[in-house]
Amino acid sequence: MYFACAKHIEQAIDEFLDQYEVSPDLNRIEGDVAGTDISVRCRFCAAPPIYRLS
Ligand SMILES: [Zn+2]
């Protein structure tokens, strides 16, 4: 499972495709992060993620 901010979502999709060879399901998690895991960050920077790829 990957997490990505708005800036890095395309990069995250590319890397997900390389890793799993299937298209990820994108789930928008903006506003919901605090309720799940506050340590979650974008895979490519320190920003709070907007999307979860699974
Ligand atoms: Zn990012």
Image (spheres, rainbow, N blue to C red):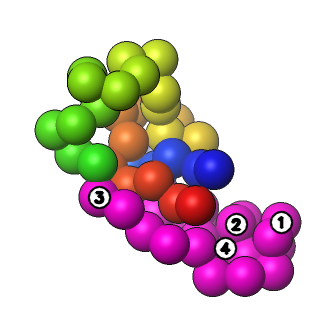
Circle 2 is placed at which residue position?
Answer: 16
The C terminus sits in image quarter: bottom right
Circle 1 is placed at which residue position?
Answer: 19
Say whether residue 39 is visible.
yes
| Foreground tag (4 vs 1) | 1
The amino acid pointed to by label 4 is Asp
The amino acid pointed to by label 1 is Gln
Circle 3 is placed at which residue position?
Answer: 28
Circle 4 is placed at which residue position?
Answer: 14
Sequence-wise, which precedes: disc 2 or disc 3? 2
Question: Real-space Cα distance between discs 4 and 1?
Answer: 9 Å
**Mark 1, other Cα within 10 Å: few <14 / some 14–19 / many ≥20:** few
What residue range appears in magenta?
A: 6-28
- Do the CB atoms of the residues marked 3 and 1 lie less than 8 Å apart? no
- Do the CB atoms of the residues marked 4 and 2 lie less than 8 Å apart? yes
| Foreground tag (4 vs 2) | 2
Lateral position of residue 40 relative to residue 21, left or right: left
